[in-house]
Image: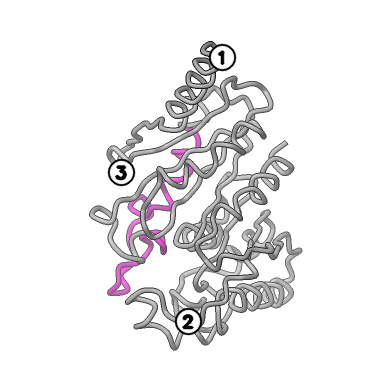
C-alpha cells in the first residue's frame, strides 16, 4: 500500500512539474516574453505545435494548464506567450495586435504583436525538435480577438489552422470603422481573398449570451459593439454571415467554418472549449 501511495505521489509531482514549464522568447523587436508550455513526454514525428493566446486577464499559465490533458492525449506541444498588461496595456496593444495606436497612427509591422507569432512558432518547432512544420494558433476571449485579426491583417502567415473562441466583438466584414469593421483598416481586397482561402474556425459557446458590457472599454463602445449583435453568440453568427457575403463579393472560395459548442457556463468556459479545439487541431495538423 505504501509503495502504491509513493508511486501515485511521484506521478502527481511529475505532472505538476511538467505543467509548470516556462521559457523566455526574444528577437530583434521583443525581449524576454514569458512562454508557458506543456509537451508530451516523448516528441515524435506525429507531434504538432499549437500556440495559445490567453484572455484579457493575461493569465498564460492558467491557459496552458487547461491544455495539459489534451496535449498528452493528442501529442500536442502547447506554447502560451504572456503579454503583461504593464508592457502591452489595453485592447489596442493586445487584442488588436498593436497594429494602430488609439490615435489611429499605424505602427511599423515589426512592432506589431502579430509580427511575433511566426518567429515564436519557428523557434518552438526547433526547440522541441518537431519534425512537421504544420502548426496552429488558438485564442479565447481577448486571445480570440487577437487570432481573428491576425488572420485578416497577416493572411500570408504560415499557420495551418487558426481557431478563435468566444470573441466579444469583431473586425466585421462591413463598413464599420476599424476596429469594428473594414473602413480605415488598411486591409486590401487581395488580403481578404488570401484570408478567406486559409483554414479558420470560429467556435461559439451557446451559453455565451450576456447582454451587458463586461469592461469599461466595452461600455464605452457599446453602440458599435451591440450593432454587431445582441450578445457574443449572435455577434459571432453575424460575423460569419458577413464573411460569407464578402467572400462572394470578392469571388473567393471560402474555407472558414463555425461551430457552436453546447456550453452551459456563459463566457468563462475555456475548459469547455479546449477539448473541441484540441480535436480540431489533431485532425487538421496531421
Q: Is residue 108 magenta?
A: yes
SS category of the residue bearing label 3: loop
Which is more N-terminal, label 1 or label 3?
1
Left or right of 253, for residue 232:
left
Task: Tell me the crowding category of disc 3: few under 14, some 14 to 19, or many 20 or more residues within 10 angstroms, Cα based.
Answer: few
Residue designated by label 2: 225
Asked whether residue 67 is drawn in magenta, I would say: no
Which residue is identified by label 3? 29
> Viewer-proximal residue, 176 or 235?
235
Q: What residue is shown at x 32% (from left), y 74% (from top)?
A: 104
Apparent side of residue 185 relative to residue 57 in the rendered image (left or right) = right
Q: Nearer the viewer, mark 1 or mark 2?
A: 1
- In three-dimensional space, the C-alpha distance between marks 1 and 2, rounded to whole angstroms, equals 59 Å
1 vs 75, nearest the viewer: 1
Residue at 56% across, 84% down: 230
Rendered image quadrant of residue 220: bottom left
The quadrant the N terminus occupies is: top right
Name the residue rendered at 35%, 35% in the picture.
25
Q: Residue furthest top?
A: 3
Task: Mark 1: give few (<14), some (14-19) or many (20+) Cα within 10 Å.
Answer: few
User: Which residues are drawn in magenta?
Assistant: 95-122
Q: Secondary structure at mark 1?
A: loop
Percent position of residue 85, x then y: 28, 56
Q: Position of residue 170 (x, y in %)?
A: 52, 72
The quadrant of the rendering that contains the C terminus is top right
First in sequence, mark 1 or 2: give its number.
Answer: 1
Mark 2 or mark 3: whose residue is earlier in sequence: 3
Amino acid at each position: 500500500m505504501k509503495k502504491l501511495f509513493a508511486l501515485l505521489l511521484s506521478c502527481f509531482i511529475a505532472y505538476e512539474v511538467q505543467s509548470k514549464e516556462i521559457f523566455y522568447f526574444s528577437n530583434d523587436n521583443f525581449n524576454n516574453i514569458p512562454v508557458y508550455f506543456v509537451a508530451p513526454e516523448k516528441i515524435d514525428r506525429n507531434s504538432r505545435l499549437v500556440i495559445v493566446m490567453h484572455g484579457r486577464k493575461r493569465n498564460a499559465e492558467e491557459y496552458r494548464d487547461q491544455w495539459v490533458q489534451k496535449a498528452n492525449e493528442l501529442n500536442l506541444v502547447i506554447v502560451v506567450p504572456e503579454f503583461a498588461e504593464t508592457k502591452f496595456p489595453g485592447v489596442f496593444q493586445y487584442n488588436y495586435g498593436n497594429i494602430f495606436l488609439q490615435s489611429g497612427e499605424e505602427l511599423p509591422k515589426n512592432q506589431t504583436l502579430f509580427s511575433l507569432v511566426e518567429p515564436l512558432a519557428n523557434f518552438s518547432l526547433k526547440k522541441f525538435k518537431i519534425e512537421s512544420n504544420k502548426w496552429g494558433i488558438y485564442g479565447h476571449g481577448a486571445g480570440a480577438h487577437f487570432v481573428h485579426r491576425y488572420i485578416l491583417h497577416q493572411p500570408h502567415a504560415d499557420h495551418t489552422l487558426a481557431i478563435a473562441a468566444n470573441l466579444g466583438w469583431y473586425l466585421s466584414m462591413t463598413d464599420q470603422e476599424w476596429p469594428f469593421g473594414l473602413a480605415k483598416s488598411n486591409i486590401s481586397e487581395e488580403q481578404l481573398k488570401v484570408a478567406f482561402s486559409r483554414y479558420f474556425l470560429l467556435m461559439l459557446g451557446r451559453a455565451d449570451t450576456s447582454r451587458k458590457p463586461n469592461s469599461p472599454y466595452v461600455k464605452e463602445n457599446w453602440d458599435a459593439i451591440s450593432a454587431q449583435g445582441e450578445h457574443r453568440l449572435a455577434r459571432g453568427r453575424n460575423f460569419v454571415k458577413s464573411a460569407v457575403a464578402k467572400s462572394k463579393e470578392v469571388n473567393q472560395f471560402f474555407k472558414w467554418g463555425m461551430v457552436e459548442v453546447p456550453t452551459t457556463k456563459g463566457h468563462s468556459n475555456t475548459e469547455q472549449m479546449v477539448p473541441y479545439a484540441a480535436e480540431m487541431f489533431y485532425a487538421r495538423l496531421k
